[in-house]
Image: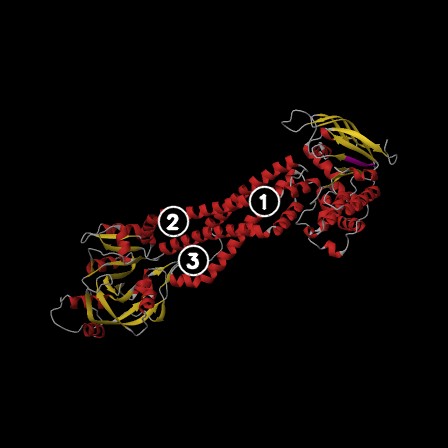
Amino acid sequence: MKFILKLALKSIRYRKATLLLSILSISLSVILLLGVERIRSGIHDSFTSTISGTDLVVGARTGNISLLLSTVFHIGYTNQNVSWESYEAISSSPEVSWGIPLSLGDSHRGFPVLGTTADFFTHYKYGHNLAVQPKTGNTNIGEMNCVLGSKVAKELGYEVGDNVVVTHGMGKEEFMKHDDEQFVVTGILSSTGTPVDQTVFVSLFAMDAIHSHFYGQETEEHDVFEDVLNSHEGHQHEKEPNSITGFFMGLKNPADILAVQRKINNYKSEPLTAIMPVVTLTELWNIVRPVEKMLIVISVLVLIVALGGILATLITSLNDRRREMAILRSTGAKPKHIFGLILIETIAVILSGILTGIIILQAVAILSKNLVAEKLGLMIPMEWFTINELLLLFSIILLGTLVGILPAYQSYKKSMSDGLTVKK
Amino acid sequence: MEQLKIKDLEFKWNGQENPLLRIDHLRIEKGERFFLQGESGSGKTSLLSLLAGITTPQKGAIELLGQLINKMKAGERDEFRASYMGYIFQQFNLVPYLSVIENVTLPCQFSNHRNKAVLASGSNARDEAIRLLDHVGLAGKEVLHKPVTELSMGQQQRVAACRALIGSPEIIIADEPTSSLDEKAQQAFIRLLLAECSANQATLVFVSHDAKFSHLFDKSARLENGGIIYTEQKSKGGAK
């Protein structure tokens, strides 16, 4: 059989012009199949780890997904707020390690503005426990400072030191402008591939102060800037807001999560909802799962088409090779040798297609890694093959072998009946 | 001692009504050079398939080297052919993706028997191939390193002859090996083949539709309407 292997390889080399197309079509479908799988798992991973390290997300009573969308993705409005008292009470309970208050509802040229505290940058984690890091400047959102997500800075062309004007309401239509409330950019964050990239971070207290000022809740006319600055410099006491959109929470002991969640959901003084972000992220992902499956199905179909093409090429070529088979038979090759020869050739073509595909895919992935991370905020995993990918590769090889058996059997049969006669 | 014996043979392909071949008696002695003339449609191809053990007759016996090959299983016949038979086709004898030497040594790859025969002579497959090629005037470097598809028809047939002869098989079957050559080359090739067969003490069965070279052989016969008609005989070799 070793000689048959050698024969098959020489035969492939001789036919390389024709086979190159087959190899190429296999490698393209491998690229498609593995590429789709890799992007899918990349999106899935980066999506389900949009927020990590946060045990519970709390907001006013609403659906799990809508709470997640509004607090983590900054999509949609919440009808109700959480009172500051409840936040204080819950976040100071003994099981709780930390809490990050969140206030949403304002926007800056289409990007959501998040009012929060410096704790956000300490405790908010994404991916595999990654912290949000400044790319330039720092994450000081005290006073009238603001910190921009990477995409905000990039699209709007802001740099550290620029002024930012905040608008009320979400969306690009600036129907209510806090005209004189200008924030100064103190930092721009590194790309994370999470909604953080599209967020403008300001201090919760500054945000509240603007609102109070704008809606005239404060009776006296005065400059908000001064107000905030005063409160800061003055008694080290920032004026607390009446209510917030929600808050993130980390517990001391993960075993308490369910108990605390239940407690919050049954909170007496105000109707609240607490969700485990990982669970709800998965629920949300399940909504797009059919699309994900569709992608895989399409790439499998492409693979089948490619294998069908190879089958057609092989079967056509077999007719031209009857003389070669007769020669081999006349020199002592048995039908099983002919079978082996064709099978090995097919498998070798498919394997080289797979190999070419993998090499091209890895090369493209490595070359475009930074670009994809930056432009799409997507971390495509670069490590060696996952179980899923190995399964895919294995099934391609299996399918390819099955495809190879047909022409191999045909030429086996033919070499039996043709024998040494060659019809030219 | 006869090396090839056919008795009361009847053969037809599947689906045929009347036998294509009906050969009562055919004997070829060891070392004999036998010329068989047959027009196309005379059953020539069928007879060669039977001799090579690709097919088996419905009736009668084919004995090669004292063994009844029509009683063998397909695999055994393959083995037998590989070990004891060299076969030369009409044209396009060579595997296009193998070198000249690889083409010549093919039988040594498929048959242990042939390979051992080469080794027993104190050589190896490659050297033996070069020796044979040298005999037929093809051992020059410019020929050895050429892709076989670039050799002339005459050169290709000579390479094929070397392949048939390597490992000294007992029987050489040549199926119109000269029909693609011009007349001058035809005669040269036949003389070369006859000489090499004699040197290897191989029995040669040479088939052609053209009787003009039959006088070069020890014995000749004509295949007509599925039967063998002996023509002239020279009193030479083991012919009877």
Image position of B30 with respect to A50: above or below: above
Q: Amino acid at mark 1?
A: Ser
Residue A376 percent coordinates (x, y) = 38, 60
Chain hosting mark 2: A
Read off the residue under disc 3: A380
The C terminus of chain A, quarter of image: top right
Q: Amino acid at mark 2?
A: Glu
Q: Amino acid at mark 3?
A: Ile
Looking at the rendered image, the disc whose residue lies closer to the viewer, 1 or 3, is 1
Sooner in the amino-acid sequence: mark 2 or mark 1: 2
Q: Quadrant of residue A172?
A: bottom left
How much space separates mark 2 and mark 1, taking CA atoms? 38 Å
Asked whether the residues under the numbered discs 2 and 3 touch, taking CB atoms below 8 Å apart as contact, a structural biologist would say no
Q: Is residue B189 left or right of residue A321?
A: right
Outermost residue, right side: B235
Chain hosting mark 3: A
Q: Which residues are magenta?
A: B32-36
The N terminus of chain A, quarter of image: top right
Q: Quadrant of residue A195?
A: bottom left
Counting labels gives 3
Read off the residue under disc 2: A292
Q: Is residue A144 left or right of residue B24?
A: left
Task: Give the SS element for disc 2.
Answer: helix
Give the number of the disc on residue A317: 1
Asked whether the residues under the numbered discs 1 and 3 touch, taking CB atoms below 8 Å apart as contact, a structural biologist would say no
Colour scheme of the rendered structure: secondary structure
How much space separates mark 2 and mark 3, taking CA atoms? 16 Å
